[in-house]
Image (cartoon, helix red, strand yellow):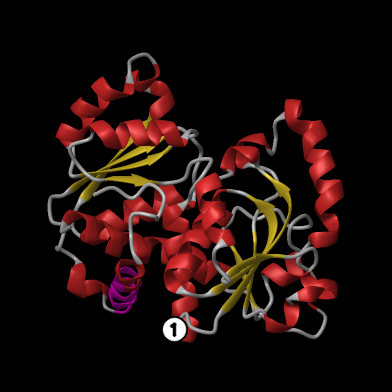
Amino acid sequence: MHLLTLKELDGKDITEIIQEAIKMKENKEDYYDICKNKGLLLMFQKTSTRTNLSFQSAINQLGGYSVNLDWNSSNFTISPIQYETRYVSRNCDLIMARLKKHKDLEELAKYSSVPVINGCCEKYHPTQTLADVMTIYEYKQTFEGVTVTFVGVHNNVVNTLIIAALKLGFKLNLITPIINDAAWDDELMEEVKQSDLVKSFDSIEEVIQETDFIYTDTWIDMENFNNEEYAQEKDARINKMMKFQINKKMLKNHNPLIMHDMPIHPGFEISENIVESENSIIYQQAENRMHVEKALINFLLNS
């Protein structure tokens, strides 16, 4: 079994994974050798802090080991994916790949003899969303009656939040004035039309009163943030999105818990005082990447 989108799991699977992750978080020592001598291959085509560190920490804390492979300096750049994959999957028990194109992940999974985990692509970010819903569950102990509001650009994170909302039953409000065309999933958005759980709005004022968790993300993809060739588009996005910044003025007297998947660009999608406010659960959310990845690794190895 592979995890490329989050569509592969049903609501029961997701709930069991996050419940196991919470147990692992609270009782680390009970799990120190459940993946003894198991190898995790980490493949990076995109830069990473959380995905890289959390997966290395996760497999090591389970008694296994990781091998880090830079996609751009490997022979994946000069040979068809199918041939390289058939080789590398013979050297490990799982593969986590953080690639630019989802179609390359699908090719990787097609020819791999071991489970493949999507560590982020242009369409989906399933391990981030597992950490998100784990964090929500830690606070609410349920998804019933929970409302999450996402404010920002419709991107890979939004897609996987939508998938989670449809499977777990929480309400997801979307305020996404800009859509990343590469992230758009026609099939998923057709599902949204058939559901009352996911709805789009023009402003935070329409939904802030019912919001339990407010979530934002970068307006500019990380590979383009310092790209001079992208400067004009970056400026246009900032100009359009500044009125959607998560700040005290936007929140007024409301106190939802604050989420952000990081990296943070203070002064753009979120103000610095909100990042460090008492309602911010951003660092807990980020820490939970490691815990939920432990549970996911164990789940996939025993599926």
The structure residue drawn at horizontal position 35% and vertical position 52%, both measured from the top left corner, is 55
Can residue 287 be seen in this snapshot?
A: no
Which residues fall within the magenta stretch? 16-26
Q: Is residue 140 visible?
A: yes
Residue type for callout 1: Thr
**Front-most of residues 20 and 176:** 176
- Magenta highlight: main SS: helix
In the displayed structure, would residue 248 be above or below residue 160?
below
Relative image position of residue 216 (x, y in whole percent)? 66, 61
Q: Nearer the viewer, residue 162 or 114?
A: 162
Residue 118 in picture, x, y percent from top left: 39, 45
**Image point 51% across, 39% down: which residue?**
47
Q: Tell me the element at label 1.
A: loop
Placement of the C terminus among the 4 image quadrants: bottom left
Residue 161, x across and y down, in percent: 52, 61
Q: Which residue is mark 1?
A: 142
Point out the residue furthest to the front here: 194
Q: Write down the quadrant of residue 196 in the picture.
A: bottom right
Across and down, in percent, residue 246 comes to 75, 66
Q: Is residue 302 above or below residue 80?
A: below
Q: How many marks?
A: 1
The answer to which quarter of the image holds residue 150 is bottom right
Residue at x 83% of width, y 40% of height: 235
Magenta span contains residue 23:
yes
Question: For this view, does 213 lie left or right of residue 176?
Answer: left
In the picture shown, does residue 85 fall above or below 288? above
- Is residue 138 found inside the magenta-colored segment of the image? no
